[in-house]
Image (cartoon, rainbow, N blue to C red):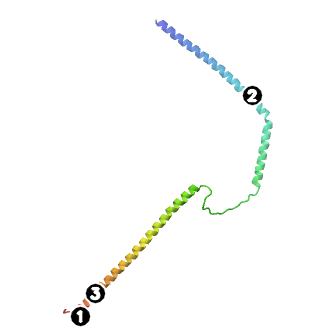
């Protein structure tokens, strides 16, 4: 029984080895065909390169003429025009411009109004404080005058 199992397993392994061998032979044929195709493409490429010296000459002439034209253009004097202008309405990027300007404009207007309000509030406080202080001083002077008058009256009429 064991011999039969071993024999079947060995036959299966042998079959698999044959299949792998056939695949290797096919792969080698494919590689040889591929190498032949690559070599034929290389030969065609070399034949094209040997036929194209006229094209290379033409290309070199075109490049030299292009460089000459470029140098002629660069040598010509250029007119420089200075334009000075104030743009209230920008030509490009209007959305970002207005966002920046009005965002900052509103912020600084509010800061200016806040500073102006605080300044006027401080001025009013100082003026009121001066007025109150002046009233206190005049009240103290009146009280001092009355006290002085009473003392003087008491010195004049000590019996009363």
Residue 158 coordinates in the image, percent (x, y)? 20, 92
Most distant residue in the right direction: 54
Q: Disc 1 or disc 2, which is closer to the eye?
A: 1
Label 1 crowd (10 A; few <14 / some 14-19 / many >=20): few
The one nearer the camera, 119 or 155, is: 119
Label 3 crowd (10 A; few <14 / some 14-19 / many >=20): few
Q: SS at mark 3?
A: helix
Describe residue 42's horizontal placement relative to residue 92 as left or right: right
Task: Classify residue 46 by image quadrant.
Answer: top right
Seen in the picture, residue 16 relative to 131 is either above or below; the reply is above
The residue indicated by pointer 3 is 146
Residue at 48 percent across and 66 percent down: it is 112
Describe residue 16's horizontal placement relative to residue 149 as left or right: right
Q: Disc 2 or disc 3, which is closer to the eye?
A: 3
Residue at 64 percent across and 20 percent down: it is 28
Among numbered discs 1 and 2, the one appearing first in the sequence: 2
Image disc number at residue 43: 2
State yes or no: discs 1 and 2 in contact (Cβ < 8 Å).
no
Residue 123 coordinates in the image, percent (x, y)? 42, 73
Residue at 70 percent across and 26 percent down: it is 38
The residue indicated by pointer 1 is 156
Seen in the picture, residue 12 relative to 141 is either above or below; the reply is above
Among numbered discs 1 and 3, the one appearing first in the sequence: 3
Q: SS at mark 1?
A: helix
Seen in the picture, residue 151 relative to 106 is either above or below; the reply is below
Q: How far apart are marks 2 and 3 (CA)?
A: 133 Å
């Amino acid at each position: 029984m064991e011999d039969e199992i071993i024999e079947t397993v060995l036959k299966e392994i042998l079959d698999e080895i044959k299949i792998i061998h056939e695949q290797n032979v096919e792969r080698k044929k494919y590689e040889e065909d591929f190498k032949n195709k690559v070599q034929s493409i290389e030969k065609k490429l070399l034949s094209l390169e040997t036929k194209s010296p006229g094209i290379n000459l033409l290309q070199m002439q075109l490049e030299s003429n292009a460089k000459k034209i470029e140098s002629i253009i660069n040598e010509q004097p250029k007119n420089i025009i200075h334009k000075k202008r104030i743009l209230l309405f920008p030509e490009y990027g209007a959305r970002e411009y207005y966002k920046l300007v009005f965002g900052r404009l509103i912020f600084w207007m509010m800061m200016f109004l806040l500073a102006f309000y605080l300044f006027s509030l401080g001025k009013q406080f100082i003026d009121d404080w001066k007025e109150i202080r002046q009233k206190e001083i005049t009240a103290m002077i009146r009280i001092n005058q009355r006290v002085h008058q009473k003392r003087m009256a008491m010195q004049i009429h000590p019996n009363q």
